[in-house]
Image: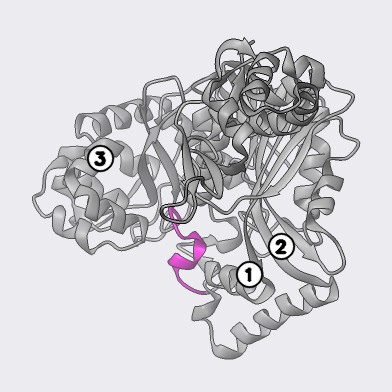
Amino acid sequence: MPRPRDNGRVTSSPALDLTHLAKLREALLAASYTADGCLDLLGSTGYAALARSEAVPALRATRGGSPLETLVRLFLLQQPVPYTAAAAALPVEDCLMDGWLSQDGSQVRATVDVRPYANEVAGLPSADAWVVSDLGCAVGGAGGIGSGETAQGVARRELVLGVGGASTTLANLAVRRPVRQALDLGSGSGVQALHAARHAQRVTATDLNPRALHFTRLTLALSGFENTEVAEGSLFEPVADRKFDLIVSNPPFVISPGSRFTYRDGGMAGDDLCRSLVRGAAAHLEPGGYCHLLANWQHVKGEDWHDRLAGWVAGTGLDAWVVQREVQDVAQYAELWLRDGGDHRSPGSDYQARYNDWLDAFEAAEVEGIGFGWITLRAGGSDQPTVRVEEWPHPVEQPLGPHIEDWFARQDFLRAHDDAALLASRYVLADEVVQEQVGAPGAEDPEHVILRHNRGMRRATKVDTVGAGFVGVCDGTLTAGEIVDAIAQLLGEDRVMLRDRVPESLRMLTEQGFVNPVL
């Protein structure tokens, strides 16, 4: 792969030389160019400012010239540094030869963004990794790299983004148990493949954009992973005859009137791309396998969006949990992605024309809003799959993956137990569930009782006196039926009638994780 011209503009992505990459990795580690090392250097204020694409605090913190400060300026802040300073921190001639750096007189510049990344997987210690992407694309989308249809010598539609909020969200959602085969569909710079490589024997990364696959290779090789492979193509085409234990996808889910940017625009009408991923997942999941994806979906006039999303899953045989995190009206949505593409910096008439294109497309399809959220699918093997579609805009615990796995396990339990079996089972109160009583000051009895869960989805639910008393004694000693009988005697209620009434609320408390069955 040719060395970039010495003009600071990217003409190609760096070469994949494994020997040189190993030396580069050693240099990054020796300088503490890691997530923890950068946090220690920049402090929480400077690190947080970088996440907002603000560089001034980090520039102030990196004026000393140490190897770590040089690397932060070079790769995080994309500032030129003296050749001599780069040589003290890196195998600089290797980096120039392979295209990681370009030289202009006595100074060198980075040609790509190399971002330290704490590769965290539940149950495993954090590991140092690095994500390689196009300059200016680590956060905030392509809008941060200037206007026009080309940038840094690369057609903007082919740009490869780095770590952003969406990729972090997806990484935190995935179930992280040891698996044989994992698929990162639409890998981009390889963030999801990085995580999967730590708990999968083999990871396959696919993308429609060949530049993205090269960046995925760079990310994985620089981070020291060899249990990976890449395949070029759209959706499931590159793995048409294969099945996986885990599928993760941060796809080009943006519902746009055209396909300008490969990293975000799916090129299908409306939300058909996300629907196609859901429909196609069943053929590529091993029994018990999980598929996690981020998605956008249309709120269409005259349709209930819950029914619309449930229809995506219907007939696949998969269990599904769909969570809508946010809804935007069509104008907000168009503005968000026009800014992402830098269109707000274009001449006014161009911006207005593109804005109108988006609104025309939504009007023609009778779209009233766009939902943002995540979808988890599981090949549970049941002839009556569980499909839950809900809205939950509230904060959740991260990582959520362990709680998602527990949620599906509880669905298996509930599906296998009728009311009599539920009452014959034992339960324990989940960790960090608290009770709140709400009522007028000085009142003898509360108006109602709230159970609040401080883990997982952090749900809250109102319960009656029976429900509050029930969860209060769930320690796994007595069956639910025995607890109900004791409550009936204490309250002077009919035992049989109370046993008939309790299973409905017991299913809700179990499904939402306030109590866990003793298996």
Q: Which residues are magenta?
A: 137-147
| SS label for mark 3 | helix
Residue named by callout 3 = 92
> What residue type is disc 1 on?
Tyr
Please tell me in which quadrant of the rendered image residue 95 appears.
top left
The span from disc 2 to disc 1 (Cα, nearest Å) is 9 Å
How many numbered circles does the render carry? 3
Q: Position of residue 320 (x, y in %)?
A: 75, 36
| SS label for mark 2 | loop
Q: Earlier in the sequence, mark 2 or mark 3?
A: 3
Q: Earlier in the sequence, mark 1 or mark 3?
A: 3
Which residue is more in the foreground, 195 or 433?
433
Which residue is more in the foreground, 445 or 242?
445
Q: Position of residue 205 (x, y in %)?
A: 62, 33
Residue named by callout 1 = 333
Question: Residue drawn at (54%, 43%), measured in percent from left and top?
Answer: 450
